[in-house]
Image: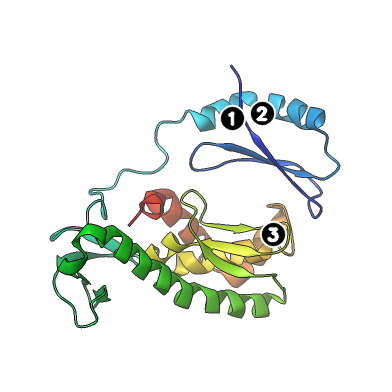
Amino acid sequence: MDLDYRIVRSPRRKQLTITVERDRSVVVHAPLTATDEAIRRIVDTKRQWLFGKTTHSQKYQSLPHAPGKEVVNGESVSYLGRDYPIEIAETESGGVEFSRRFLVPAAQQVKRREVLRDWYVSRATETILPRVRRYAADLGVEYGEARIVDNRYRWGSCTVKDNVHFNWRLIKAPMFVIDYIIVHELAHLMETNHTPRFWNIVRAKVPHTEKARTWLKEHGQILEEDV
């Protein structure tokens, strides 16, 4: 059986690693010097493991409900680790407002999902990016640019140009999870691979690393929903 994979080369990378994304795509992170043939041989040695990962039927534990499927009265959506009800009602600002519940203007009926998504993006920008700056200063690292992006199957990434990107859906997660993702990506500016040194860096700044990883394993599907 054929196994499709994407190769991402980086001048900072010294070792080859293979990851399976949450959309079950396979990505090979390789040094610039790695040839396609050498990569193919390594992928072949991992073929059985990769097929197991890409065909696994359940990525996350089942949730008792599926929040955020429809922007209607009585539905709930997540924000900073908690679920809050949606109420369709007029608002003073004419936009989405939040106060222990989400008020979504009835006038935005056709674009309810879009206006709620825009609210999330705005909150992610004002919440996450300042924390990126703070943690970068704590770690003593410099990055090119920090951005909030729309990438459903990646919570964060560090590019070959030392830019750091964070999925706007992270604003649905508890703050300790957000901090973990931020430090995880910034630590890649110091250590490209997930080596013991890398994890030592992360755990030194984020003592609740294991708690955050457990949360992501159990609730990560929340961060793949549109709203």
Q: In the rendered structure, are the residues bearing label 2 and label 3 in contact, judged by CB atoms less than 8 Å apart?
A: no
Report x, y in % for residue 220: 41, 51
Report x, y in % for residue 193: 71, 52
Report x, y in % for residue 151: 50, 53
**How far apart in space, not on screen, are marks 2 and 3 (Cα)?**
23 Å
Does 134 sit above or below residue 219? Answer: below
Report crowding for label 2: few under 14, some 14 to 19, many 20 or more residues within 10 A (C-alpha): few
Q: Which residue is mark 1?
A: 50
Which mark's residue is nearer the viewer, 1 or 3?
A: 1
**How far apart in space, not on screen, are marks 1 and 3 (Cα)?**
24 Å
Q: Which residue is mark 3?
A: 198
Report x, y in % for residue 66: 25, 49
Q: Which residue is mark 2?
A: 46
Q: In the rendered structure, are the residues bearing label 2 and label 1 in contact, judged by CB atoms less than 8 Å apart?
A: yes
Q: In the rendered structure, are the residues bearing label 1 and label 3 in contact, judged by CB atoms less than 8 Å apart?
A: no
Q: Amino acid at mark 3?
A: Phe
The quadrant holding residue 103 is bottom left
**How far apart in space, not on screen, are marks 2 and 1 (Cα)?**
6 Å
| Element class at badge 3 | helix
Query: Left or right: where does residue 131 sit relative to residue 110?
Result: right
Q: Amino acid at mark 1?
A: Leu
Q: Residue furthest right?
A: 33
Q: Residue furthest top?
A: 1
The quadrant holding residue 73 is bottom left
| Element class at badge 1 | helix
Indicate the quadrant containing the C terminus: top left, top right, bottom left or bottom right.
bottom left
